């Protein structure tokens, strides 16, 4: 892997003001806009929607019935709920843009690539390979343990949900990539080195997902550790391929593919957002075997995109 001094992606940090305190302030600013302002606006608009939609089946849950931020209402359709749940990511985009501009005087594109133009083909390669591997993995799991799955396909609900997933999910995943594998990876990498940047940015990525229902619902130390380690492993891998490919493009495609496949192909009651997916599982669980197969999955993806495919010209 190129060093921080020679890696063109890390070198992008030096295009603007690169003092360490600027990254600290910029990170707090972006996260405040995302979690506080975006969260409050999203919840407020969702509650207003439920109060004004005229549907007696949609309800605001009493505090005693709430089970986390994902369940403050009931009876709201998955498409509508998905839109409201992702509103904070629009604020995240604004927070990241504001941090890059105000604290560093850089262009937002500098978080993606050192090239003059973004390679949409490279993003497409990352998406296509990761989505295909996800599909193969799910089919293999289904045929290996069919009793763990239930056919959940409801054509009307699925088709109504599909455009929301395809339009909104890339906005959500791109915001996370711009912050964790763009802003933080460049900032930490330019001051402390690439490997420390991979570790720290992935720990912060894991922390952001630590309150997801699939994490909180685990009932053993092995399953809790394994699902947290899964998030760290994926975050570290996305950081690794970003440094190796010297751009964020592969990670952008892979992350979007992962979330879209999860939403459309398999759902679970303890998922961060239950969806009208094709298949349903009783719950999301994890163990050390999960980590082994995740590592194998990521290795295959890496071999395909770096040895089986050529980086397309920009």
Image (tube, grey):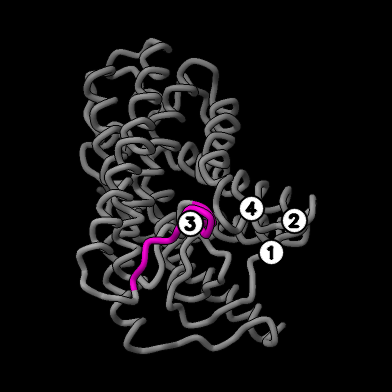
* Residue 178 occupies quadrant: top left
Pointer 1 local density, CA inside 10 Å: few below 14, some 14–19, many at least 20: some
Q: Which residue is mark 2?
A: 223
Q: Which residue is mark 1?
A: 285
Give the structural element (helix, strand or loop) at label 4.
Answer: helix
Distance from disc 4 to disc 3, alpha carbons, whole Å, reads: 34 Å
**In front: 37, or 142?**
37
Neighbour class for label 2 at 10 Å: few (<14), some, many (≥20)? some
Q: Label 3: state its secondary structure.
A: helix
Residue depth check, mark 2 versus mark 3: number of the one nearer the observer: 2
Label 1 or label 2, whichever comes before in sequence order: 2
> Counting residues from the N terminus, which is met first, the one under dot 2 or under dot 3?
2
On screen, 160 above or below 89?
A: below
User: Reading the chain from its start, which is encountered first: label 4 or label 2?
Assistant: 4
Q: Which residue is mark 3?
A: 305
Q: Residues within 10 Å of mark 4 (few under 14, many from 20)?
A: few
Magenta residue span: 58-68
First in sequence, mark 1 or 3: give its number: 1
């Amino acid at each position: 892997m190129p060093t921080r001094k020679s890696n063109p992606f890390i070198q992008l940090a030096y295009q603007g003001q690169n003092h360490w305190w600027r990254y600290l302030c910029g990170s707090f600013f972006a996260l405040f806009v995302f979690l506080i302002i975006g969260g409050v606006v999203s919840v407020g608009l969702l509650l207003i929607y439920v109060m004004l939609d005229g549907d007696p089946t949609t309800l605001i849950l009493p505090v005693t019935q709430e089970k986390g931020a994902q369940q403050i209402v009931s009876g709201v359709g998955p498409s509508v709920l998905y839109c409201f749940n992702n509103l904070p990511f629009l604020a995240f985009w604004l927070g990241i843009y504001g941090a890059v501009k105000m604290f560093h005087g850089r262009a937002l594109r500098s978080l993606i690539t050192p090239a003059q133009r973004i390679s949409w083909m490279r993003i497409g390669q990352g998406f296509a390979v990761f989505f295909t591997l996800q599909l193969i993995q799910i089919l293999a799991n289904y045929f290996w343990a069919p009793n763990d799955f239930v056919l959940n396909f409801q054509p009307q609900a699925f088709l109504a949900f599909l455009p929301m997933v395809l339009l909104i999910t890339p906005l959500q995943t791109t915001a996370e990539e711009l912050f964790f594998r763009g802003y933080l990876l460049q900032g930490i990498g330019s001051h402390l080195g690439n490997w420390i940047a991979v570790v720290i940015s992935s720990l912060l990525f894991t922390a952001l997902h630590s309150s997801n229902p699939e994490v909180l619902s685990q009932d053993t130390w092995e399953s809790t550790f394994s699902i947290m380690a899964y998030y760290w492993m994926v975050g570290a891998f996305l950081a690794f391929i970003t440094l190796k490919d010297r751009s964020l493009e592969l990670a952008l495609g892979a992350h979007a593919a992962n979330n879209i496949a999860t939403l459309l192909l398999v759902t679970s009651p303890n998922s961060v957002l239950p969806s009208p997916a094709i298949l349903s599982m009783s719950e999301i669980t994890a163990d050390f075997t999960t980590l082994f197969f995740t590592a194998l999955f990521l290795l295959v993806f890496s071999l395909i995109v770096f040895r089986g495919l050529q980086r397309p010209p920009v």
